[in-house]
Image (cartoon, rainbow, N blue to C red):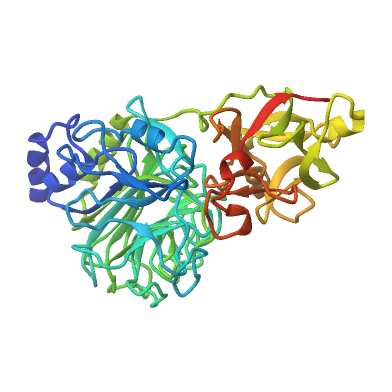
């Protein structure tokens, strides 16, 4: 009771409107030791950089700051800096003052990253466009082989020390692979056994002790096990599938044999406690190592996907009352959806043909069976040829952006597989329907030449429709590890014009 009275008294000195989550934790006696967000300041006094973007055209970088001290990210700076090129989020700065910044994760025991030196990919700067408090902002949209890490940290809990972790995520962007985590992990990037991690997991992987339904769930990754409860092989009936568009998740562990999982809707309402009790058998005392991970597992298991907006790690075992104040602050921040694209809107149900830029004559994205390539078609071409380059605009997966259905092959859509474009349906590649739907969803952006459009992959938002010299079409970047990622000629090769369908 005395601790509660102390926390409430301290909070009286902090205006909820002016405070950030770290102000609330600090006032309650649970200091922030890591605070990461690309959308807003997490302390009312913070006016430093939120994150860094690096553009593909020349490799230059710039930092994105809040609009004002303690405010929302200045997305206009990013938009101006990244105009007519691609940008990546290369650093997510720690706002706590401890210097625990996050950057590309190095290789680990489970996976070596695809970038030079074995590092993971980092996120597209435009993959998670949202609004916060009515202002445009960008989250961190991670896909397979994408992750951030810091092994040499300052102030993060180690051993059996207590800590609290919260994150705000996109509850609709996840999968069942290992492991989309934010929190405390091994410092050598390897699986060092049970008790060596304490991280918040979000996704539909059915853990050692699962939640109800089919997921996704907020679980704790304690290494060698994902836990929604403390009974291995069982289902915690109090841990529901939770998929609010903006979801708050909490994992916290005390120095005693006590830990807890909580969560709720980041746009409204309060938190619920999904588990509170002793740790699973074999997980006490803990042997936490103090590295910080985002989007990957402790050994760099990198098959998961998810979207991160903000998160904090504290020392101490935060009280439910203080976390409830943090949840109220998150709700007051005003997370909201917005268009996930900035290019011209397409009309669902209309017929379009996508003309390539920088080529003589009229050349379009078309298909011959499942094969996609650039095809020359004019007004004098046959009706069959015109149909091959004409697609009906459909709504993308779960309302995200758009999909393109072949007019002469109903039920078949432009999709990417192993980075190459095909016209296909969900049966032909033996992949799950949800994967097919993700991989056939694309978002229009302003064309890189200053006109026309670029078509960004929703599931791999660093990548855009890109023709290559033999006429094939891939999802490519402006500089990357594959032949279709050359920085040369990207601007022309990734720009198309959506015209009225030729058929």
Say which quarter of the image contains residue 279: bottom left
Image height of 152 relative to 264, above or below: below
At a point 63% along the width and 54% down the height, the residue shown is 484
User: Can residue 425 be seen at all in this image of the molecule?
Assistant: no
Vertical relation: 255 (above or below) 394: below
In percent of the image, x 51 and y 49: which residue is there? 216
Question: Is 498 or 166 nearer to us in this picture?
Answer: 498
Seen from the viewer's position, the closer of residues 123 and 321 is 123
Residue 277 lies, with reference to residue 439, above or below; the image says: below
Q: Is residue 193 above or below residue 19?
A: below
Residue 285 location, x and y as percent?
Answer: 27, 74
Is residue 162 something that shows in the picture? yes
Quarter of image, res 260: bottom left
In x, y percent, where is residue 425? Answer: 77, 45
Q: Residue at x 51, y 67 (%)?
A: 233
The C terminus lies in quadrant: top right
Residue that lies at the very extreme toward the front in this rendered image:
360
Residue sitting at 66 percent across and 36 percent down?
Answer: 358
Residue 181's spot in the image, x, y percent?
Answer: 41, 58
Question: What x and y, as percent, mark residue 226?
Answer: 45, 63
Q: Is residue 180 left or right of residue 499?
A: left
Residue 332 location, quadrant = top left
Of 56 and 136, the residue lying toward us:
56
């Amino acid at each position: 009771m005395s601790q509660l009275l102390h926390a409430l008294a301290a909070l009286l000195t902090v205006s909820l409107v002016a405070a950030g989550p770290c102000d609330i934790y600090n006032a309650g006696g649970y200091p922030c030791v890591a605070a990461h967000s690309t959308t807003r300041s997490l302390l009312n006094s913070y006016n430093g950089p939120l994150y860094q973007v690096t553009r593909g055209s020349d490799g230059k970088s710039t930092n994105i700051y809040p609009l004002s001290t303690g405010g929302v990210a200045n997305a206009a700076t990013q938009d101006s800096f990244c105009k007519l090129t691609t940008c990546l989020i290369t650093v997510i700065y720690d706002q706590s003052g401890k210097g625990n910044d996050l950057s590309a994760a190095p290789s680990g025991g489970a996976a070596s990253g695809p970038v030079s030196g074995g590092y993971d990919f980092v996120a597209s700067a435009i993959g998670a466009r949202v609004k916060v408090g009515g202002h445009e902002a960008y989250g961190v949209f991670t896909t397979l082989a994408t992750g951030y890490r810091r092994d040499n940290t300052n102030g993060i809990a180690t051993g059996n020390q207590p800590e609290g972790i919260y994150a705000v995520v996109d509850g609709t962007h996840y999968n069942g692979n290992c492991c989309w985590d934010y929190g405390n992990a091994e410092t050598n990037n390897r699986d060092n056994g049970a008790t060596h991690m304490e991280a918040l997991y979000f996704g539909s992987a059915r853990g050692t002790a699962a939640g109800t339904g089919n997921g996704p769930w907020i679980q704790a990754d304690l290494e060698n096990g994902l836990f929604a409860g403390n009974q291995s092989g069982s289902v915690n009936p109090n841990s529901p599938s939770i998929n609010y568009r903006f979801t708050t998740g909490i994992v916290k562990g005390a120095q005693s044999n006590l830990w807890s999982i909580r969560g709720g809707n980041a746009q409204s309402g309060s938190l619920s406690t999904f588990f509170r009790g002793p740790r699973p058998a074999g997980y006490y005392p803990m042997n936490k190592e103090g590295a910080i991970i985002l989007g990957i597992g402790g050994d760099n298991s990198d098959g998961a996907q998810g979207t991160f907006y903000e998160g904090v790690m504290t020392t101490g075992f935060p009280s439910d009352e203080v976390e409830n104040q943090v949840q109220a602050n998150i709700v007051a921040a005003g997370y909201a959806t917005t268009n996930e694209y900035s290019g011209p809107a397409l009309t669902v149900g209309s017929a379009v043909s996508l003309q390539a830029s920088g080529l003589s004559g009229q050349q379009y994205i078309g298909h011959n069976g499942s094969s996609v390539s650039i095809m020359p078609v004019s007004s004098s071409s046959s009706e069959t040829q015109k149909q091959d380059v004409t697609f009906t605009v459909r709504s993308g997966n779960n309302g995200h952006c758009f999909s393109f259905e072949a007019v002469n092959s109903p039920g078949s859509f432009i999709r990417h597989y192993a980075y190459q474009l095909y016209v296909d349906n969900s049966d032909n590649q033996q992949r799950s329907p949800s994967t097919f739907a993700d991989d056939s969803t694309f978002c229009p952006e302003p064309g890189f030449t200053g006109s026309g459009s670029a078509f960004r992959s929703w599931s791999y938002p660093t990548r855009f429709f890109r023709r290559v010299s033999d006429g094939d079409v891939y999802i490519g970047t402006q500089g990357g590890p594959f032949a279709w990622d050359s920085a040369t000629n990207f601007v022309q090769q990734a720009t198309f014009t959506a015209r009225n369908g030729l058929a």
